Image (cartoon, rainbow, N blue to C red):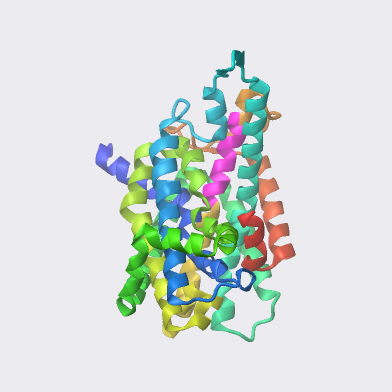
Amino acid sequence: MRKSSSETSAATALAALGVVYGDIGTSPLYALKECFAPEYGLSPTAGHVVGVLSLIFWALNFVVSLKYLTFIMAADNRGEGGIMALLALLRPRRKAGRPVPRRLLIMLALFGAALLYGDGVITPAISVLGAVEGIGVAATSLPAWVVPIVSSLILVALFAFQRHGTARVGAVFGRVMVVWFASIAVLGLVGIARHPEVLAALNPWHAIRFFFEDWPRGFLLLGAVVLVVTGGEALYADMGHFGKRPIRRGWFTVVLPALVLNYFGQGAVLLDDPAAAQNPFYSLVPSWGLYPMVAVATAAAVVASQALISGAFSLTRQAVQLGYSPRVTILHTSHSEIGQIYLPGVNRLLAVTCVVLVLAFQSTGNLASAYGI
């Protein structure tokens, strides 16, 4: 019996929710915490909290809603996205009577591709570490080596699962992300109910005022604020897997509302207790729900890694097709979607590098500085 178009569309949207939005969806685990890290010297006063929340809200909307979903996703190469797709569409234009050298455009595109691979390595490491660090909040007596070792084992299992293909991975992970987004939205609503004054951050003036009142520190703080949009590039890179409509629908109906509610809820917790800046996400969780939330967060962090892994697969295939990469083994995992692929060589390289990063850095605080840069 054939599925209706609406059923197919719903299934695709669910899979896209699991694959595409895992990374940006788990940024609340560590993003606001890093904004109030000691190296920035920012105390969680009411003015600072509202200013940072305003920066976060408008960063999400300018970078993701406007830049990626509105403009960049309109530039696809036969349904494929990513920086290599942009390179294939580029045509050198004349400047002062001379054409801009195509070699320069190629170098810029390859540099951007290298950054995406770097993102694909750091994202799984920081996302899984951020979730597993909740164990330390719930059980403070655990040895320091437990978090990186558990994180490494989770990452090994994740990369081993990749051979089943994007569709199957997305279908499983999509359900996990529905639970995750519902959980963080509810937690955020509870926090906002205690301090509804954090909703003032919707006014962009608070972001502007915060930035200009202390511009040197405000500029440096952008290195932490940018953590809230990590994985935004995956929306474009993974477009060939699912198409534009399911990705856009998932953002505006599920992901953006849940993220905004949770960030604002974390801000409300900081107004209640400035000491919660050590881990505002888990401080938002009631004590009885810490272990269940660690489990949900860990599952969501595993999903978060998927967005950039799939993006790296797509990027590598496009680089091979354009002649900028040696040939690699490419396995097609779907009978209906040409964009759903698995690259075992790339998968192994990402797996080894991620585990090395986790064991070397051992905490999200250490990795966040590299990510911010």
Q: Quadrant of the N terminus?
A: top left
280 or 46: nearer the eye?
Answer: 46
Task: Measuring from the top left, give residue 5's x and y in whole percent.
Answer: 26, 37
State the image quarter where residue 272 is shown: bottom left
Q: Is residue 320 above or below residue 188?
A: above
Could you tell me which residue is drawn at 39 percent across and 46 percent down? 65
Query: Measured from the top left, where is residue 60 in percent x and y?
Result: 43, 53
Task: Tell me which residue sits at (61%, 56%) in the image.
Answer: 372
Residue occupying the far bottom of the picture: 141
The answer to whether 151 appears left or right of 19 in the picture is right
Residue furthest top in the image:
97
Viewer-nearest residue: 72 or 339: 72
Query: Residue 311 colored magenta?
Result: yes
- Look at the image and give the residue range highlighted in magenta: 306-318
- Whether residue 214 is visible, yes or no, is yes
Extreme front residue here? 213
Look at the image and say whether residue 310 sits in the magenta stretch: yes
